[in-house]
Amino acid sequence: MTGRVAAVNLGVVTVAEWAGDASGRSGIDKRPVDGPVPIRFDGVVGDFIGERAHHGGPDQAVYAYAEEDAAWWAAELGRDVRPGGFGENLSTYAVDVTGAVIGEQWLVGSALLQVTKPRTPCTTFAGFWGVPDLIKRFTARALPGAYLRVLREGEVGPGDPVEVVERPAHGVTIGEVFRATSLEPELLPRLLKAEELPESIREKARRRLAARG
């Protein structure tokens, strides 16, 4: 089955006590839009990002989350989880986001995107959902979604195919990186095989391995 974009979501300004930046604003509340949206090297046009120290930037220009994984959370929590509910720009269908290989390239609409790293859950995410232990539960479930960098600017809209056009041979996946940096440190050596992984994560892996001797 061909993977597709189920929805394209843009962040609106949310002001709350749990919001991450100094002004108490967050862009985690993302909502579906109609029609194609331009994607630039620095992110999705029209998307609001509140705490730029930890969100956005070239390695986090676009965030994708699988519709199937969102459905699991909806059942687990007994509530509706609409597209954009994870703060994702792209809600995908029939795309193995957790199994995506670091550095693999997706042709989506007219944009070319590259898988960079998993999302790390934060207090803003837990506050937005109103689930105090969400970070712990999200980490245990290990379905983090994938950040993407933009290799070629373009437009992406609902229904566009998601085609994997290149996949590195190292095989290190989004799921492995997430588990290595959270629950399964024995996977840390694998991270050093993925040259496309942001250097900050590779350096963290080196430090942790050195500390373990």
Image: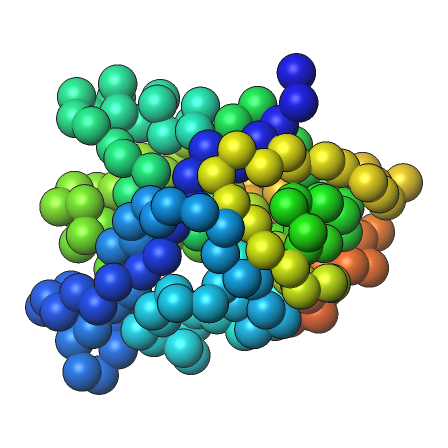
Q: Quadrant of the C terminus?
A: bottom right
Residue in the image at 34% along x and 75% along y: 51
Q: Position of residue 196 (x, y in %)?
A: 78, 59
Is 106 left or right of 134, judged from the image as shown?
right
Residue 198 against residue 98 in the figure, above or below: below
Image-quadrant location for residue 136: top left
Residue in the image at 26% along x and 78% along y: 21
Q: Position of residue 19 (x, y in %)?
A: 20, 67
Residue 210 against residue 42 in the figure, above or below: above
Q: Position of residue 141 (x, y in %)?
A: 42, 31
Residue 53 against residue 79 in the figure, above or below: below
Is 125 left or right of 66, judged from the image as shown?
left
Q: Nearer the viewer, residue 204 or 84?
A: 84
Q: Position of residue 116 (x, y in %)?
A: 66, 56
The mark total stands at 0
Is 94 left or right of 144, judged from the image as shown?
right
Q: Nearer the viewer, residue 146 or 11?
A: 11
Outermost residue, bottom side = 22
Residue in the image at 59% along x and 69% along y: 40
Image-quadrant location for residue 83: top left
